[in-house]
Amino acid sequence: MKVFFHGITVLPLLILWSFICRMATGEEEEVFDFPKTLEEFKFYFNKEGQLRNVETDEPFNFVVEPDNQKYNQKRYEALGNIITDHVYKLLEDHKLKRVKIPVDAVPEEPTSFFYMSEDALEKDKLLILIHGNGVVRAGQWARRLIINDCLDSGTQLPFIEWAIKEGYGVIVANTNYNKANDKKDGQEIKGSKTPEDHMECVWENFIHKSKASAIGIVAHSYGGVVTLELAKNHIDDFWRRVFAVALTDSVHSFHHQNGDESVIHFYTERAKNWASSLDELDTPIETYSDYCPTVAAGTDKHEYTSYSSRFSIFKFLSEKYREMMEPGGEKAETSEKKSSVKKETEETAMSQDISASQIDVEMNSQNPDESQKEEL
């Protein structure tokens, strides 16, 4: 929020004045010391993957100090960081290995990383998972669901398990790990300064060089923006190798991202978006200016769309894979295909034609009035 006075933005001045007042009165920013492990937090995940209190077996409670919103929020964030490490461990338990990028990093240079199955680059089939923006990291769809619902709904584990069972190699992107040691004030990481940079680095150095002739992509929310940028940069490779793109409540925009006719044609042929809606699962949704076929995800909750539509996505991937592999199927097609879809000069803005900066998804773990910034 910006406050203007005679055309001057005064919010920075207010912040500076608040800082000066704290210094003058000796008041310092309150620092909390929270546990560093789930055990110290006195939480565990039960057999159903639900987070529970060790002593009471009750779910996580966001409001532990009703009169101290800041404490509640900082506690939630501290637990969220532990959840991130826990999910990393679960990925490794599923035989996925951590791979550092950039590949040419020199000693002392900050690095990011992603996860992939041991034989991912040798497999003929490859599944790529791309989360949304915000606090989520590799293996997560929604931190809020991990903490308040269960691991299955909040993580990518159901998708990873399905892919491995179906014979896919798996790559799990980590597009929000952009600064040294994953700190807000850390040095920017070469090749991973933005989610788009991260995915481009992974594609160029690993996916492009892999043996996979059939690649599927599942992307949530801002992951759809990242995927569209990837398609624009590698549309020939997409036509040859990417048999399906499954999106969940994607916020991509062909208009804002300048997708050309070849990209638009690719999306009309091989992509589908499961959007949050009150309609039943797989009900077609008219999107006007979005050329990507869109259906209802079976939920009106943004963060839940990946989990609620998972079986439809698995079916979609399997059908598209068979189409691509059939003799005379789409596998022989390239970006030379002419699109019958034409851009209209005047397009009506739709709910999905928005940039990440235009959306600020505020979600709360328990109390709607006590919100914390979550993933987009």
Image (cartoon, grey):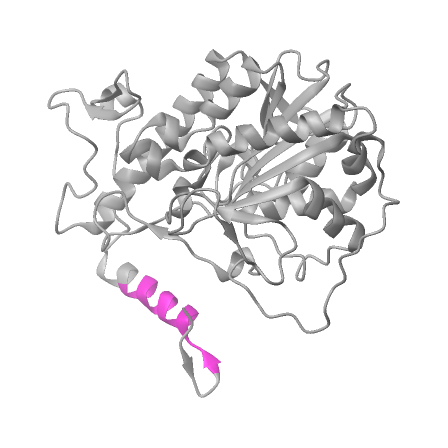
Residue drawn at point x = 15 percent, y = 23 percent: 57
Residue drawn at point x = 53 percent, y = 33 percent: 313
Can the viewer see residue 376? yes
Q: In the image, 204: left or right of 58?
A: right
Where are the magenta residues, as a range?
8-21
Residue drawn at point x = 26 percent, y = 38 percent: 75
Q: Quadrant of residue 65?
A: top left
Q: In the image, 340: left or right of 373?
A: right
Q: Is residue 137 above or below residue 209?
A: below
Q: Main secondary structure of the magenta part?
A: helix
Q: Position of residue 118 (x, y in %)?
A: 62, 11
Q: Is residue 79 above or below residue 126?
A: below
Q: In the image, 36: left or right of 123?
A: left
Residue in the foreground of this view, choosing between 279 and 251: 279
Looking at the rendered structure, the number of numbered marks drawn on it comes to 0
Residue in the foreground of this view, choosing between 108 and 156: 156
In the image, residue 137 lies in the stretch drawn in magenta: no
Q: Position of residue 370 (x, y in %)?
A: 24, 52
Q: Position of residue 81 (x, y in %)?
A: 38, 32
Residue in the foreground of this view, choosing between 123 and 42: 123
Q: Quadrant of the N terminus?
A: bottom left
Q: In the image, 338: left or right of 263?
A: right
Q: Is residue 29 above or below residue 217?
A: below
Residue in the foreground of this view, choosing between 296 and 239: 296
Can the viewer see residue 105? no
Q: Position of residue 346 (x, y in %)?
A: 68, 74
Residue that sits furthest to the right in the current view: 336
Q: Quadrant of residue 48?
A: top left
Residue drawn at point x = 81 percent, y = 24 percent: 327
